């Protein structure tokens, strides 16, 4: 993994970055319904499939890999891996796990299942320690569907990575639709980029 520092003075997003990070700090979210009919028909396990799909598209585009390091420098990770929530029924709490990304889905699913088997019963915020810097957050809320979802972060204006939240899927007219909320920082990611992300993710899911 590499973190490439951006020269802000020569960056093509210089004006937009300063405007939305300093002059008018701005984050925003978009909630979409994804057609996951193919995933359901193939009886594929939904969570690892979505983690794989989201991470695949994140790794295609720099705007979803742009972050700030501990020194306050803005840069782009060469690749990202998902850090995702799991639920504990006995305590009604959650923990975070992370799994190394592999472009081969079968290998990624195996790694996911290994992590779940090893750390799935560990209580506490971080069930699997040693979280790498190049992770992005994904949450699953499988108990209800939703039309919109937004996180209110006290220090959200200094957080540039995307945040994904998945809800419960519904069947409508023979199709299975899954809500996905995407929260981003406007200084590094515009509406065009979010829409491209959604379209590419949908294409991947339809051709599973």
Image (tube, grey):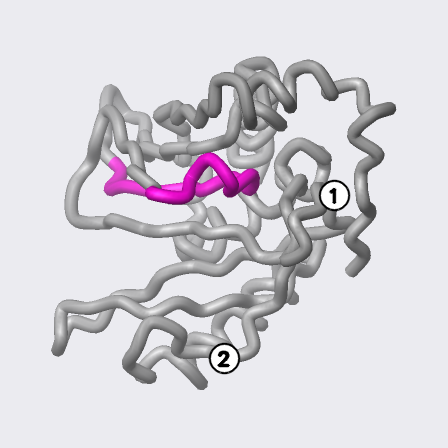
Please determine whether, in this image, residue 2 is positioned above or below residue 21.
below
| Badge 1 vs badge 2, beta-carbon distance below 8 Å | no
What is the secondary structure assignment of the residue under circle 2?
loop
Q: Is residue 110 visible?
A: no
Residue depicted at x 41% and y 54%: 47
Q: Position of residue 67 (x, y in %)?
A: 63, 44
Residue 146 percent location from the top left of the image:
21, 31
- Residue at label 1? 76
> Which image quarter is the N terminus in?
bottom right
Toward the viewer: 42 or 201? 201
Q: x, y percentage for residue 165? A: 36, 42
Q: Earlier in the sequence, mark 1 or mark 2?
A: 1
Q: Secondary structure at mark 1?
A: strand
Give the extent of the magenta segment.
154-169
The label number, if any, that marks residue 129 in the structure image: 2
Residue drawn at x 74%, y 43% is: 75
Relative vertical location of residue 138 with respect to residue 109 in this rendering, above or below: above
Q: Residue furthest front?
A: 23
Would residue 121 be found to the left or right of residue 77 on screen? Answer: left
Label 1 neighbour load within 10 Å: few <14, some 14-19, many 20+: many
Please give the name of the residue rendered at 72% of the width and 35% of the height, measured from the top-left corner: 62
């Amino acid at each position: 993994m590499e973190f490439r520092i951006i020269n802000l003075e020569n960056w093509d997003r210089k004006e937009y970055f300063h405007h939305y990070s300093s002059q008018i700090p701005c984050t925003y979210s978009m909630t979409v319904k994804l057609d996951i009919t193919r995933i359901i028909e193939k009886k594929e396990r939904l969570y690892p499939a979505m983690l794989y799909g989201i991470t695949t598209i994140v790794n295609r585009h720099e705007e979803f890999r742009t972050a700030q390091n501990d020194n306050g420098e803005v840069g782009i990770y060469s690749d990202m891996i998902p850090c995702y929530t799991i639920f504990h029924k006995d305590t009604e709490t959650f923990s975070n796990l992370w799994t190394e990304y592999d472009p081969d889905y079968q290998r990624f699913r195996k790694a996911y299942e290994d992590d779940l088997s090893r750390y799935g019963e560990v209580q506490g915020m971080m069930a699997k320690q040693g979280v790498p810097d190049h992770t992005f957050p994904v949450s699953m809320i499988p108990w209800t569907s939703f039309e919109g979802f937004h996180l209110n972060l006290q220090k959200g204006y200094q957080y540039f990575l995307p945040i994904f939240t998945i809800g419960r899927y519904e069947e409508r007219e023979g199709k299975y639709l899954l809500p996905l909320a995407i929260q981003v920082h406007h200084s590094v990611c515009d509406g065009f980029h979010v829409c491209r992300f959604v379209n590419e993710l949908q294409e991947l899911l339809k051709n599973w």
